Image: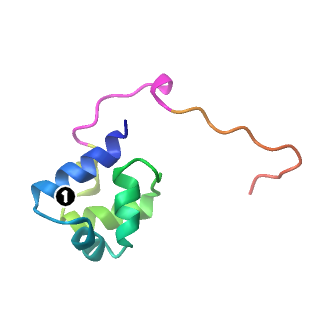
Amino acid sequence: MDLFGNEIRRLRTARGLSQEKLAELSAVHRNYIGRVERGEKNTGFIYVLKISIGLNIRPADLFRHLPKLTHADLPAEPKKKKGKKEK
């Protein structure tokens, strides 16, 4: 279940916007919106800002209806490969 993606979809459809139109208003690719809504793509802060601009809302409004989470609710971080340095 992807709470953030579901919230974007809820806000988008409440405004009568297609994924294509929201992508255009947000200055991102349509596939990006679809992947975020389906939970296939974790989005960075700049994209939170872009999507909030496309929806004509404050960035905080994207998180307003999300429940309070704990660390147990988060997915496990992937294991680092040996020999790879962090950037």
- Magenta part of the chain: 64-74
The reply to whether the magenta stretch includes residue 58 is no
Residue 51 image-quadrant placement: bottom left
Which residue sits at x=39%, y=73%?
29
Label 1 sits on a secondary structure element that is: helix
On whether residue 67 falls in the magenta region, the answer is yes
Residue at position x 47%, y 53% from top?
41
Residue sitting at x 41%, y 57%: 35
Tell me where residue 53 appears, x and y as whole percent: 25, 67
Quarter occupied by the N terminus = top left
Foreground: 60 or 67? 67
Which residue is under mark 1?
12
* Residue 55 position in % (x across, y down): 20, 63
Which secondary structure is most common in the magenta stretch? loop
**On screen, residue 84 above or below 25:** above
Please state the horizontal and vertical placement of residue 77, each as a whole percent of the image. Answer: 62, 37
The C terminus lies in which quarter of the figure?
A: bottom right
- Nearer to the camera, 50 or 21: 21
